Image (tube, rainbow, N blue to C red):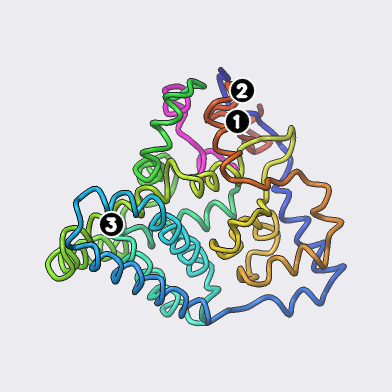
Amino acid sequence: MKNDYTYTQNENPHIGRGREILKKYPEVRKYIGNYPLSGLYITLLVLFQFSLGYLLNDQPIWVPIVLAYILGAIISHSLFVMIHEACHNLIFKKTWANNLMGILCNIGQGFPSYFGFKTFHLMHHTNLNEYDYDADLAFHWEAKLINNKSWRKVFWLIGFCFVEAIRPAKLKNSKVIDGASIFNIILIIATNILVYQFLGANAFLYIFFSTFFGVGLHPVGGRWIQEHYTFKEGQETYSYYGLGNKVAFNIGYHNEHHDIMTIPWVYLPKLKKLAPEYYNHLMAHQSWTKVLITFLFNKKFDLYSRIVRNKPSEGL
């Protein structure tokens, strides 16, 4: 088991690479902007979740839970990707319209994450892998508690949605709960009550477990490991180019996204194709399932399997 993160004093690699790409390929700028069609996809996915949940009313209680794992988790994960797009204002031009889309995603997930995620995800970009400012990094106590034991990593990933909810508490100079987050929580509680009352208990269970599985022990859950856990010495960020991108709005193109985060999901493969010399030499994953199995059962991986950036004045 590791006792700490791997530290570096190198700057965020995406800053320089993004600038180089824009300078070398100025035509990349035509991909920067918004993709309003994402709003339609969000609406259809939310309606599908509600409709399917309603159709499960007469089924035994295990049916919505099993279906949530088989299908619902994939859909809820796709809504998480759309939340990500909304955070970066990549759906519509106006911030309020993107916020509305993020809230709609939360309604379809039954979990109030949008405003909190938006705050801390943008910090993740500006302060990538800085312990005090990146909520994507585990607490030290969390990493030591889970260590490299497979059964502990399994239980950690099962409850990852709750882990993500408490991680912001370690960040400096940021509010864990603000007015927008309180509004988010109250609204989703209210819509959950309406779902239970008008669509039925099974619909509520289906939506809840879809989100629970979509952030946890599920093939799409491999995405949370794929992005920044160290599979190659010295490389901080990893892309995924498997078939899952077809149902997850290209979220696997993670190096590309960090390099130029103003490009919506639909154009990220075009960025890679236009500038292959910046990406083809980097290690990339082809299977979220393989990522998940490797992380969980290979003892060389634990929550400290990350590269963390120190400020020069802090030393190593």
Left or right of 152? Residue 244 is right
Task: Provide the secondary structure element on which disc 3 rests.
Answer: helix
Left or right of 85? Residue 274 is right
Tally of numbered discs? 3
Q: Amino acid at mark 1?
A: Ser
Which dot, 2 or 1, sits closer to the camera?
A: 2
Residue topped by disc 1: 305
Residue topped by disc 3: 206
- From what the image shows, is residue 195 above or below residue 285? below
Let me know if residue 237 appears in the view. yes
Where residue 109 sits, quadrant-wise, is: bottom left
Residue topped by disc 2: 300
Q: Are marks 2 and 1 in contact (CB under 8 Å)?
A: yes
Q: Amino acid at mark 2?
A: Lys
Identify the residue at image location x=78%, y=46%. 282
Please provide the residue range marked out in magenta. Answer: 129-145
Task: Provide the secondary structure element on which disc 1 rests.
Answer: loop
Identify the residue at image location x=43%, y=40%. 217
Task: Provide the secondary structure element on which disc 2 rests.
Answer: loop
